[in-house]
Amino acid sequence: MSAISYSDVNADILRTLERPKPAYFLLLIGFVTAFAIGVISWAIQIDVGLGLSGISHPIGWGFYITNFVFWIGIGHAGTLISAVFFLTRAPWRAPVYRAAEAMTVFAVMTAGLFPLIHIGRVWYGYWLIPYPNQRMLWTNFKSPLMWDVFAVTTYLTISVTFFMLGLIPDLASMRDSARGIRKFLYSSLALGWNYSYQQWLHYARGYLILAAFAAPLVFSVHSIVSWDFAMAMIPGWHTTIFAPYFVAGAIFSGLAMVITIMVPLRVVFDLKKYVTDHVLQSLARVILFTSFIVGYSYCTEFFIAYYSGVNFERAIFYFRPFGEPGSGLPFYPEGQMGFAQIAFFIMFFCNVISPLPLWRWKVRNNAIALFIISILINIGMWFERFNIVVSSLSHDFNPTLWGTYIPTPVECGITLGSFGFFFTMFLLFTRAMPTLAIAEVKEMLTPPYRQANHDHVPWREYATERSEDKD
Amino acid sequence: MADGIRRRDLFKVIAAGGATTAAIAACADKPEKLIPYLLPPENIEFVPGMPLDYATTCMECPANCGMVVKTREARAIKAEGNPDHPINQGALCMRGQASVQTHYNPARLQTSMQRDGETWKQIPWDAAETAFANAIKAVGNKSQIVYMTGNASGTRGGFLDKWLSAMGASPKLVLDPLGQHNIKAANQLTFRRAEIPQYRIDQATLLVNFGAEFLETWLNPVENNRLYTTMHAYDDATKRKGRFVQVGPHVALTGANADHWIKAKPGSEPLIVLALAREVLSRTHGRAVGADRDRLTSYLEPYTLERAATESGAEAEALRKLDDDFAKAEPGLALAGGNLVATTEGTQFQIAVNLLNYVAGNVGRTVLFGASRQIDLSSSHAEVEAVVKRMQAGEVKLLIVDGANPLYHLPASSQIAGALDKVPTIVSLSSAWDETTSKAHLVLPGATFLERWGDAFPQRGVYSLVQPVMATYYPDVKAAEDTLLSVSAKLGDATFKATPTYRDYLRQAWQQVQKEVGASGDFEAFWRTSLQKGGVFRTVSFSSSVRLNPDALSGKPGVAKIAGEGLVLLPTVSLRHRDGRGASNPWLQEICDPVSQVVWGSWADINPVTAKKMGIAHGDMLRVKSPMGEVELPAYLHYGVHEDAIAIPMGEGHTHSGRNADGYGINVLDLLPNAADPQSGEFAYLTTRVQVERTGKPGYLVQLDHSPRQLGRGIIQTQTVEQARAGENTEEHDPEEMKHGHPYFDFYPLREDQTPGYHHTYRWGMTIDTERCTGCSACVAACYAENNLAIVGKTRVGLGREMPWLTIERFIEGEGDSFKALMQPMLCQQCGNAGCEPVCPVYATYHNQEGLNAQIYNRCVGTRYCSNNCPYKVRRFNWFNYEWEAPLNMQLNPDVTVRSKGVMEKCTFCVQRIARARRTANGEGRDLRDGEVTPACVQTCPTKALTFGNLADPNSAVSKKAMRGRNEQDKRVRQYEVFPSLKQHPAITYLRKVTFEPINQEA
Amino acid sequence: MRKPFKGLWASFPYLDDAATVAAKLQQDGSDYSVLSPCPRHELYEAMGRPTSRLPWITLVFGALGIFFGYGFPSWTALDWVLPVSQKPIVGIPAFTIIGFELMVLLGGISTALSVVLLGHFELFRHKLPHSPAFKAYNRFSNDRFGIVVRCEEGDAAAMEQLMRQYSAEEVVREF
């Protein structure tokens, strides 16, 4: 990247904020419509009742919780890249992390909607918040759902903070170049950032600490989400591998979504020289890795179900791939395939088989191939969550009260709406903020030196140790 | 305003009476005086919010059980059995429980109407009566007036006869397709006693049943259930258990309870009966029959066991074993009824059964005559048919229907439809819309039996009273009897001058009763106490010595002739709708048939083997064709039906009985020929074969069960009678473990110190004896009635959104003819270590001090996590705001919240009843006594399979049954909890079913 | 109270020059600030590896979070005892999650806020020019390094000479 100078960076990135192509608006309209469909479907559901969704007895959780887990999972890549890879000093992080962080924020916002959508009396949703009410009746902190409330809100707050903190210097540099109302907005958001080193000092330190906080959060949040299931006694839920299994899955799907977003982005804004193939390739490597963890977890589940010898466990893991258990009764056909089996096989193909081509360098370096695989992975991961949530519930302890799942238009509409919401937010973001971190990209460039020879460090002769705190 | 009026009627209604079972005064006339609700007059024991109970008699079926109806603010809200009543002893069947819905039936006739053309014109009541009177006047030849009623119990029959003769009309017809004329005729022929004997099932040690659905509808099912379990259920103390063998082509609820099912060709059973008689006779050397021995021997000669076996297709071995047992039985009992005797040789069949009982010496021991049971007062099919013929001939000018529905209850082949069209005037005194009333010209709506006076004499010594428990719900509604009385008055007839109202007539009749029972004192006191008790109950001894009538041996019963091609059509009597009355009660539609688990509609039981041959799959839509007609209904693959037969339940397929009945299922009577048994005149509905074919359409069959197998999960456990007698608990437990208060070792022992407020004074618990449970589903209906459970309809049940808190679970073990259908109630287990509680984020469910999983509806936000985490899946979620179609909402129990959309609900052992009882106890400054609280399900169980009480008290009945290790001598034999490995510590202990042959429950 | 800015500022196209100047100023112990488009270790070294007080703030708030995370649920559980399925009323393992989340929450927010606030407090100690010229100059956010020196008019000449010596692009005196 030595070819690029500091001023190029500003030029290139600020250019992305200029008037977009009409294609942009077409996309925007599309996603806004999808969002609108979702909103209307939800309104109808609130009015008529949850019976409009495919959820029923005994399957108390369906599409909505599936979507919740799916979006939370998407929301993991951003913080993973920006925090964990910041701490590990991954060289390819800088160009992708801003977009990834934005993705995280919007994904978590989307996810946050679903617990509300799925509860029976959304108008009392605020009862889930421990606030002092007339009777001083508090919430049950032993409930995994309560843990969720805290985990998700914390995660959202921290990722937003992290996001905004990273934005401050860039907002300042946009303030300097912008004029009119934009100038006012940016400068108010820049919080009076001047590039003095005293500020850089606290900034660097604070950013490091925040990263150190966010890193464990990445792993904790999805572990806690997984405990929603693992804490219940439903066969297929009640296992100890869920936390790592979910986290790996989350990173897996999240990074896939990053690729899904970055590939078109770098074309549209022609940022190829920053978001290089190398960057995508490194993402692909992590995807391949996590795909193997996920695949391994699938196998472990089956093995443990067999090895435990528990009737219920074995039954559910027989049911997932092979369908209804053998009964010897002519009116209860054995191996009857249904929603669960479809979900299972889609999941297995997309998450375990489809990433395998990434072993080849050629595929990893081919943006199109990566894009396709990433889409497959997103689909697969959605079905993984569906498989976990629904098929386990449909065949639990009491065989006479087993059930099947029939999706309905309303819940499909709401699911569509969630994608609409997410991409609308992201598109707006690309217009309003730099999709690449200007300052951090500059950090990676070779700084302008008068002496060509970089080993010549004149300041070393004068440099003296001192502490800011001496006065 | 209407409310106000009814409320004021209340004070007339309860003008007198005791607090708990109150007697009441006449309510025929409307009150004049306005009484403010807030200050009730002194002479009325009425406290707003306190229930008032009225003793009366159930009129849902001819069995006439005693009933206590609970009213709140002048609304009948719950029907329960009358504990003082000798026949049902406090229990009710599901139809009895649902009688309040008959009362609040949305399809009730609300006002007097006159037909003009195709539409109805509302006319004032008086005008309607005048029109009625004129209609009678108009008929020249008064014998052309015909009166059809559905009920002639007690005094009513006599009253109708008197009224009709006064009018000069032809004698009344009492319609009931399920009469018992065969039994009467047979007994007349065999023993010269034209009556229904008392079957002392409880006395028998072996019960052989030929098709009588005695646990469902036959005679008095509530009584039968009680007697049957007394005989059959394993008794832990005496270690005795009776045997019950079912012979016949079909297994419904009754058959499912049998220890052994001998499959026989439909119509061939008489041969088996006689073969048994023959063998028993030869084994016992005719000990029982004395002089009749030779006559019988020669008569029974041709009926060899081999012949029976070959002709019926039953294994000879099984038959031999059976007659062996029957000969040994001390005593045994053979029953026949239901569709098996509904052939044209039904009487011969019953005679054969009589002979069997006679030669085995059961007559006088388990078959008692002289009880003069009035369970069937119906006119024979022959009589009805004669009248239908007269109608067709246009010899009937005026037809009065009153609770009778000939258009539905007579087979289409009887041409009843055409016959009705020929009748110029039809007057309906029925209380609700039905097929016949929809054809009427004049309607004077009758009152339901909760609004009118009446009585019933089910058997000798039992005089049961019917009294209004509330004023007529609609102002323009009047008891049929009173209508008749005022009409006769209008016609200037003097017969009833002394008794202007039916109440007066009844009182007059009961002065006679007072004499009969020899009650001294003045009549008023007698009347008052009778009303309070719900009648007069005397134990009368009667001689039942009978001798065999040689003429009985004239017949030569063989295999009943069943005409036509294809499969034999077995119309079965529906447990839920009987012959079709009460089909408009949503409860009875939505509570599943326990064996098939089907709701809302008809199905056709067909044997899997036959189905395979015909390429029929479960749920396929079938076209069933007979010479008389054809119907379409879904197939139900069922091992419990003969390969050569197809069984279809009665009672569905209404067209004008309100939207809860119309359009659901089909009326099997449409397929039947208009046949009758020549000897008894009984309607013969097992007389035709039908062509069955697939329509190719998928049938819409909604079942509550998903997997019929329990996959070795030990939900319904069984053990053999040997194991039970040996006192071995089929799951072995280390006595050390028993010390935990439950038999399963806890890795983390209970930390009650950590959870303050646990189980103060009470730990409510229940035991369910699956050995006693016959699956009659009365408890389910009771739960619906007590707890305002919503009715969701067929499609929503199909999606798994049914709302029962208590369901009868059915699992099938084994295959082919040796299959076994196990049933047991499943309800909230009120776990001590419940999965549902900790997962609720808002404490909407928690463990209260009395050990209940309290469910706080108004705190619930509806995450449904609790339901997911409930291994028994007994929690129900309100997917919508469910509505109670008016006036069904009047039945809602004010003590129980009506749950709104988005809220989880579940059983809490009828916590409202616990609270009410505790209030009383606290008022008296004491703790609750054992048995003082009974949840609705426990209260109505005819077989006492459920026991409820305080587990914290080691001496309570429930603790003694549950054997939770609190008593030193506790030794668990049949006790088990469901899913013990999940460590939920359920408060419900099940008692294993005891079987003669071991039942393989491996996965 | 606001002392008017006294001193001069210069912009450098090259990082090594700016760093050397900074190092010299640091050595002389004169009151200066460095401006740069992005943090660079060269400047950091030149300025003698200054440190920040910020981690202490984070520590305090993080600890506070943990305390509330355990304290609040325990108090609410005891305030109105509602037993759920034989779980201990005060379930420490369950509350650990709340504790962790609140630690991250408070710690994180406090960190972000103190980054901004501390950055502003620095301005009281190390003033920047208020002149329109300085405000109008927006290349520090782009590709120029800046050095601001607060000094008396007397030393100005020496200072400017130092800047120029390291090829300062432009030097502006403000008195």
Image: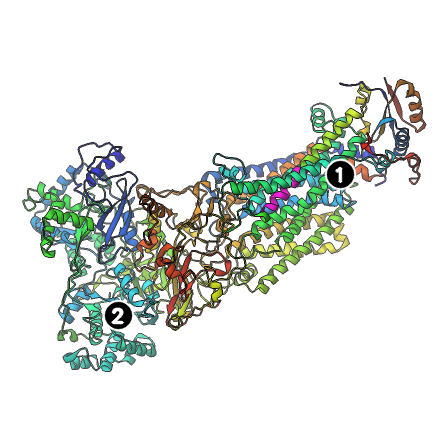
The residue that label 1 is drawn on is A270
Task: Tell me the chain of label 1.
Answer: A
> Which amino acid, mark 2?
Ala
Q: Residue at x 58, y 44 (%)?
A: A148
Q: Which residue lies furthest to the top in this view?
A: C175
Separation of residues labelled 2 and 1 (CA atoms): 94 Å
Residues at marks 2 and 1 touching, judged by CB atoms closer than 8 Å: no
- Give the total of numbered labels: 2
Looking at the image, residue B427 sits to the left or right of residue A424; the answer is left
Is B301 placed above or below B693 here?
Answer: below
Q: What stretch is highlighted in magenta?
A: C94-107
Q: Which of B501 and B410 is in front in this view?
A: B501
Task: Tell me the chain of label 2.
Answer: B
**Residue B358 location, x and y as percent?**
19, 74
Q: Nearer the viewer, residue B115 or A90?
A: A90
**Residue A370 location, x and y as percent?**
71, 49
Question: For the stretch drawn in magenta, what is the main secondary structure?
Answer: helix
**Residue B132 location, x and y as percent?**
14, 42
Looking at the image, residue B961 sits to the left or right of residue A172; the answer is left
Instruction: Rate crowding at label 2 as few (under 14), some (14 to 19) or many (20 or more) other CA atoms within 10 Å.
Output: many
Q: Residue furthest left?
A: B494
**Residue B613 location, x and y as percent?**
41, 68
Instruction: Rate crowding at label 1 as few (under 14), some (14 to 19) or many (20 or more) other CA atoms within 10 Å.
Output: some
Looking at the image, residue B768 sits to the left or right of residue A372; the answer is left
Q: Nearer the viewer, mark 2 or mark 1?
A: 2
Q: Nearer the viewer, residue C13 or B140?
A: C13
The residue that label 2 is drawn on is B204
How are the colours assigned in the image?
rainbow
